[in-house]
Image (spheres, grey):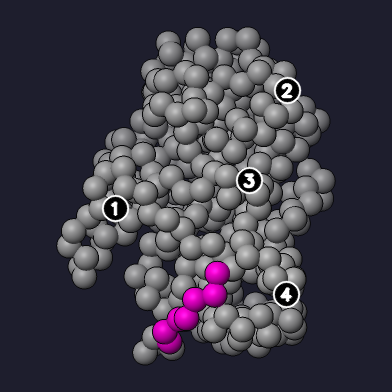
Amino acid sequence: MKLLVTGSAGHLGEALVRTLRERGHVVVALDRVRSPFTNRVGDITNRSFIRGCVSGVNAVFHTATLHKPHIKTHSRQDFVNTNITGTLNLLEEAVMAQVEVFLYTSTTSVFGDALTPSEGAPAAWITEEVAPLPKNIYGMTKAAAEDLCQLFHRNHKLPSIVLRTSRFFPEEDDSRHIREAYSDANAKTNEFLYRRADIEDVVAAHLLALEKAPDLGFRKYIISATTPFLPEDVRELRLDAPAVVRRRVPDYEREYSRRQWKMFPSISRVYVNAKARRELGWEPRHDFGSLIARMASGVDDLRSSLAQVIGIKGYHGGTRMDFIRSSDPSQSRQAPSGTIVRPTHLSRPQKTTTPASH
């Protein structure tokens, strides 16, 4: 097949290009930034450029986007131009070129305020039935682009699948509190319980969506690691998350103790991937239980081989640390543009400091 991947210089875009080429597909790899995995350099807001990229392709993987960290460096109009108009250009040209499948990489950030329960309420159990309540321009524009995909399926019969991915980027957390209270590896491993996925599993979901889309028509799926939690856990998760984790994954305490890691005291939301597993046949390989098992077996780096190869990239227009430091009064100097911030491997033992708030 001939396939178009937008955002080919980014984490997911590169991972898709690598995987699709390995499987023998012809890939048109589009990005604004030159990279070894980009063969068409241009902007998705340029419709004539998009027309040339879409011509003759069987399917589109649309991963290019402005991300949440760009809120500090880009205008709201920039978000509308890239995330909405760019998506519209791709959809319009896909219909004109008789593309067979359109896959849109969205985000769990579209749920917005639905992810933050009120004081004393149980953790939010997030399925596809939860109504999005975007709380910033990033979430709003991603949700609008999802609606465009649905519109083009309705009016033009273009099979379109929306994949709402949870966290899979390797950059440090944007919360100063989390960075100070937990090692990066500790925090990311905790997140596999409820809001993180490995990029290998994210790629697998996209490939299954490509295969299933003609029969499914239009669907939205949450793409996140399989949680060990059950709906009856949601109240206790807000009050005493470690107790719930001990019950669902008993071996975790021993491995965490060896590394001087700790669990988050409270968890406020849980992403549920049951629909994607059921309808796509998706079987994610990386979850909290599998990471604990790898720790016990002595594996040094808990990431998939694909995640290790992709590494850390930062974001177009600056690195993640640029965005972190710009919002952190204690760090007045920003890393120079293009600085690479090395990630902590997910299983490297690091001592953590318990914050006063805990």
Res 91 seen here: no
Residue type beneath disc 4: Ala
Residue linked to disc 4: 296
Q: Are marks 2 and 1 in contact (CB under 8 Å)?
A: no
4 and 3 marks in contact (CB < 8 Å): no
Q: Earlier in the sequence, mark 4 or mark 3?
A: 4
Q: Amino acid at mark 2?
A: Gly
In space, the residues marked 2 and 1 are separated at their CA atoms by 37 Å
Q: Earlier in the sequence, mark 2 or mark 4?
A: 2
Q: Identify the disc placed on residue 322.
A: 1
Quarter in which the C terminus is drawn: bottom left
Residue in the picture at 34% in, 70% down: 176
Q: Position of residue 214 (x, y in %)?
A: 77, 27
Disc 3 marks a residue whose amino acid type is Leu
Numbered disc 4: secondary structure: helix
Q: CA distance from mark 2 to mark 3?
A: 17 Å
Q: Which residues are magenta?
A: 348-354
Q: Compared to 244, does 75 lie above or below?
A: above
Instruction: Using the image, determine if residue 311 lies above or below residue 317.
Output: below
Cα separation, mark 4 vs mark 3, equals 22 Å
> What residue is disc 3 on?
306
Q: Amino acid at mark 1?
A: Asp
Density class for disc 4 (Cα within 10 Å; few <14, some 14-19, many ≥20) is some
Residue 340 lies, in percent from the top left, at: 37, 49
Q: Give me the C-alpha separation between circle 3 and circle 1.
A: 25 Å
- Looking at the rendered structure, the secondary structure element under dot 3 is helix
Q: Nearer the viewer, mark 3 or mark 1?
A: 3
